Amino acid sequence: MTRLTSCPDAETVAQRAAAHIARQLAEARELRGVAHLALSGGTTPGRTYELLAAAPRDLAGTEVWFADERCVPPQDEQSNYRLADQALLTPAKVAAELVHRMEGELGPEEGARRYALELCERLPSEHAESSGPPALDVVVLGIGPDGHIASLFPGANTLDAGDDAVCLGVSDSPKPPPERITLSLGVLRAARGCLLLATGAGKADAVAAMLAQPSRHVPASLLRRERLTVIVDDAAAPGGPAR
């Protein structure tokens, strides 16, 4: 069952989200000695990252990954890494060896190939004896007005990637830039927890569609609902505030 929380405004969403991430990372470290956190870009998560950076101890023992990246250099204004670095990584003084950047400048295919190798080398599957996808502890996601998550877009072939797919190259994104790298749906579904954030009335229809029947036309609806936490502001809440 998806856990949905509606907050009065975007600032409260960020506060709730930062607290949730901190709790999940602490639990992961207690159980396994290390936590693995994947970040997304976009305006909605940015404030959450700033709040996390204000309590750097909450990130101790955490390795940082990315849910997707645009195929641009790391200091390009469109880079998800750049946003995370400015809002979280540098202010919190996260050690460089704990940050695993998607190398968008290598192009979608080579960048995805290298990231898949790194994920598989560093992260075991949820069940150590299985050969399933690597299991992240927390994945922070936004949602587009069309229901896309990471760089998995409605009806895209990437949604049909097999269970062995870890990281995928995208060359035809409907949003610029067209070339991107994204974690596969299989990896998102294998994560121990996904946290999806949405603010503003422009996201209300997408949130409602995500909570309806699973559909390839709404990639967010394909996440594992029993592992999904959704935090929205009242404007983005489907049918009004939920508590």
Image: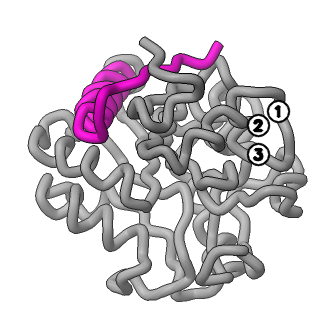
Predominant SS along the magenta part: helix
Labels 1 & 3 near each other (Cβ < 8 A): yes
Labels 2 & 3 near each other (Cβ < 8 A): yes
99 within the magenta span? no
Q: CA distance from mark 1 to mark 3?
A: 7 Å
Instruction: State which quadrant residue 128 falls in.
Output: top right
Please, what secondary structure does the residue beneath circle 3 have?
A: loop
4 within the magenta span? yes
| Range shown magenta | 1-27
Instruction: State which quadrant residue 13 falls in.
Output: top left
Q: Nearer the viewer, residue 34 or 72?
A: 72
Q: How far across and down, in percent of the image, does residue 66 sit? A: 48, 57
Tell me, for residue 214, which label it has, or none: 1
Crowding near pointer 2: few (<14 within 10 Å), some, many (20+)? Answer: many
Please, what secondary structure does the residue beneath circle 1 have?
A: loop
* Residue 29 showing in the rendered view: no
Q: Amino acid at mark 1?
A: Pro
Labels 2 & 1 near each other (Cβ < 8 A): yes
For the point 82% across and 32% down, the residue is: 214
For the point 59% across and 34% down, the residue is: 191
Residue for badge 2: 222
User: Which quadrant of the figure contains the C terminus?
Assistant: top left
Q: How far across and down, in percent of the image, does residue 53 sit? A: 16, 48
Residue for badge 3: 218
